[in-house]
Amino acid sequence: MKIIIFSILLLLLSSVLVVAENYGEPPWVYKGRGDRYYKNGEIGKAIVEYKKALSNSRDVQETSKKNIYPEINIKLAEIYIDEELYDLALFEIGIAENQKKDLQIPDLIYNILYIKAEILFNQKKYNKSIEVYEEIIKKDENWKLYSRQSPSEISEKFIEAPELKKKFGKAYLETGKIKYLQNHFDYAIRFFKMALMYKYEKEVSLKYLINCYNNIDSKILAEKAKTIYGNI
């Protein structure tokens, strides 16, 4: 509790410091400093630099517009997650999501969605967290191809696509884990299978898949899963 209170005071102080001064350097300069401070664990200094980047720069002041830099909102959301300030984290990631058209790297939208899902999970809003993961999964053409299979089927096909694995693997595993926690074992199976087809966290995904089959009394399928996925 003391840590959280201290963090809130620190955040308020950083906001005051940012408002109190005018900044003329380009936003990316402040972001670079903020990234270095964040990496070194100097959270307060990192927040101040990030806030500077989001405040009016000299050029932006002339147009009376706030600087748009969703990458910084992502960083602030990550800091607030670390501090367990989930409402603040959700606020920042919401800004980043609304400004997704301004992302310098469009695929950072996946980072935004994963962070949003993590925040909702930490707030125990499990179904809302799943909704975000499903938003990611819907972007995967392979899900549309394989999700029509019966959950009792085991596929020996593996998807050798590192970029797709990076985008979608975690969404499958985390969705399956939430469904597993909710005792929806039949429904969870297809998500663990997709995680395994991408070879995403193979040991964890296989363990959950086998446990799902055991929980629905399908020991034969559990053994088949061990055979097919055990050596990938």
Image: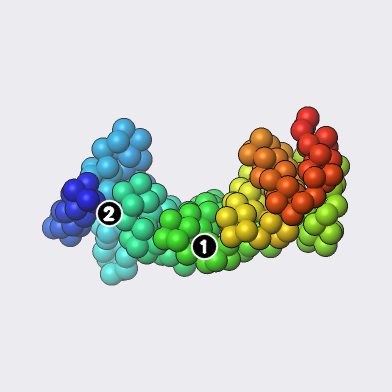
| Residue 62, horizontal then vertical, whole percent | 27, 65
Question: Residue 51, labelled with which disc?
Answer: 2
Instruction: State the CA–CA distance, disc 2 to disc 1.
Output: 31 Å
Q: Tell me what residue is drawn at x 85 percent, y 52 percent.
A: 153
Q: Give the quarter of the figure containing the C terminus.
A: top right
| Residue 77, horizontal then vertical, whole percent | 38, 54
Question: Residue 146, labelled with which disc?
Answer: none
Name of the residue lying farthest toward the bottom: 64
Q: Tell me what residue is drawn at x 42 percent, y 53 percent.
A: 74
Disc 1 residue type (three-letter)? Tyr
Q: Is residue 117 left or right of residue 209?
A: left
Of helix, strand and loop, which one carries label 2? helix
| Residue 75, horizontal then vertical, whole percent | 39, 49
| Residue 121, horizontal then vertical, whole percent | 48, 58
Q: Is residue 36 visible?
A: no
Q: Tell me what residue is drawn at x 84 percent, y 40 percent.
A: 224
N-terminal of the pair, mark 2 or mark 1, is: 2
Query: Residue 152 is drawn in which quadrant?
Result: bottom right
Between marks 2 and 1 in the image, the one whose residue lies nearer the viewer = 1
Query: Residue 226 is drawn in which quadrant?
Result: top right
Q: Tell me what residue is drawn at x 63 percent, y 62 percent.
A: 134
Q: Is residue 2 visible?
A: yes
Q: Is residue 115 left or right of residue 162?
A: left
Disc 2 residue type (three-letter)? Lys
Query: Residue 166 is drawn in which quadrant?
Result: top right
Other residues around mark 1 within 10 Å, as few (<14) / some (14–19) / many (≥20) = some
Other residues around mark 2 within 10 Å, as few (<14) / some (14–19) / many (≥20) = many
Nearer to us in this view, 148 or 152? 152
Provide the residue designation for mark 1: 126
Of helix, strand and loop, which one carries label 1? helix
